Amino acid sequence: MKRKNNCYTLPWPFDTGKDIINQIFLPGSNVVYDFHGDPCKAELIILMEGNQFMVIPDLLEAFYDYLGRKVEVFYATLPPPRFRAAIFGEPLAVGNLKLSLKPQIIMAPPEFMAKISEAISGPKTFMQNRGVVLITRRGNPKNIQAPEDLLRPDVKIAISNPKTEANSYKSYSRALEHVPGLLEKIQKEALFSSLIHHREVPAFVFYGEADAAPLYFHFAYYYQNPRFFEDPLFDYITFPEGQKGVSHYQVALVKGYEEDDLARSWYEFLDHPEARAIYAKHGFSKEFSQIKN
C-alpha cells in the first residue's frame, strides 16, 4: 500500500471548544480535534465512531434540553479500532498525553459491536447514512463524472485504509465494485490513510495528492456547509451504486453501566425524533432499516 509521510490537514473548524479560555491550540504542534470535554469532570463518557463528529455538538445541546439540565460530557470521535483498548481498561494516547477513560456509552458499526460483545449491553441500530459519493477538488479539474473515470491513468485515488479502518473501506468498496478493474487499481495504486481517514483522505484531495476519494455523503454535505466553511472545500458526485455503501450506526451501554441514569438517558435519547432530525440536518438518512444483532 502506498503511504505518504507528509502531513496534510484541512482548515478544520472547532466543532466545540472555540470559546474555552486558556487555549493552547497551535497548528503544527498542539492540535487535538477528536477529543472533546473534560475527562476529569465528566459525568458521561462516550466513545464513538468518528464520522459522526459534525453532529455531536447539536446533539448534545438537544440532549441537555431533553434532560432539563446541562451535564459534563467527554467524548472521542475516532475509528472504533482506535478506541477499542479503552473499552477494556487501557489508556488512549495522543502524543505525550494519556487518557485513562471509563466509557459508559459506545457508538459504532454493528461489525465492531459484535467483536466487543462481551463488554457491552443492548447494542441497537439508531441511524444509517446515505451511502457513498466521490469528492473531488473544487472545480473538478479532472472532470470526473462517475466511478468509471477513476480508472483513467491520470486520476489518483485516496481511500481509507483496509487494515486500520476495515469497515469504511468495505463500504467504499461495495459502492465501487461494479466497475471492472477499479478495486484492483485501488489496491495497487491508491493513497491510503494511516489511522483516521475522515481527517486524512479529504486532505489528500484538498492538497492535490489525490484527485478523488470515495466518502460518505454526510462528509461531502459537511464540506459544503457554510455554517462550517466560508467556501466549499470540495465538489462531489453522486452515483446510484453509492447506495450499496450505506452503513448503520449502533449505540450500546458498557457493561456495568446498564442502570447508570445518564448513560441510559443518552441511549434512549438517540431514538427521540429530535435526535433523528439533527442527524438528518447533517446529511444522514431520515429513515433507517433495523438490523439484527
Image (cartoon, rainbow, N blue to C red):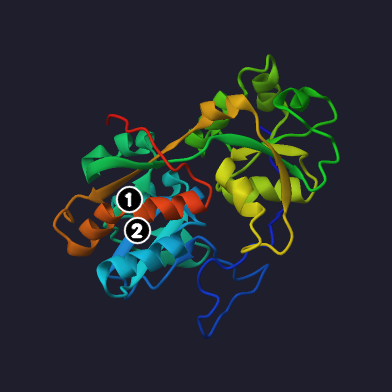
Q: CA distance from mark 1 to mark 2?
A: 6 Å
Q: Nearer the viewer, residue 161 or 122?
A: 122
The numbered dot on residue 46 is 2
Residue 66 in percent (x, y) is at 29, 65
Label 2: element kind: strand
| Amino acid type indicated by mark 1 | Ile
* Left or right relative to 220: residue 165: left
Among the two numbered marks 1 and 2 on one chain, the one whose residue lies closer to the N terminus: 2
Callout 1 environment at 10 Å: few (<14), some (14 to 19), or many (20+)?
many
Residue 169 at least partly seen:
yes
* Left or right relative to 260: residue 191: right
Q: Nearer the viewer, residue 257 or 143?
A: 143
The numbered dot on residue 74 is none
Residue for badge 1: 106
Q: Is residue 153 above or below residue 264?
A: above
Q: Is residue 183 above or below residue 198?
A: above
Instruction: Give the position of the C terminus as an image quadrant.
Output: top left
x 33%, y 69%: residue: 64
Label 1: element kind: strand
Instruction: Give the position of the N terminus as an image quadrant.
Output: top right
x 62%, y 64%: residue: 227
| Amino acid type indicated by mark 2 | Ile
x 18%, y 56%: residue: 257
Residue 183 in percent (x, y) is at 65, 22
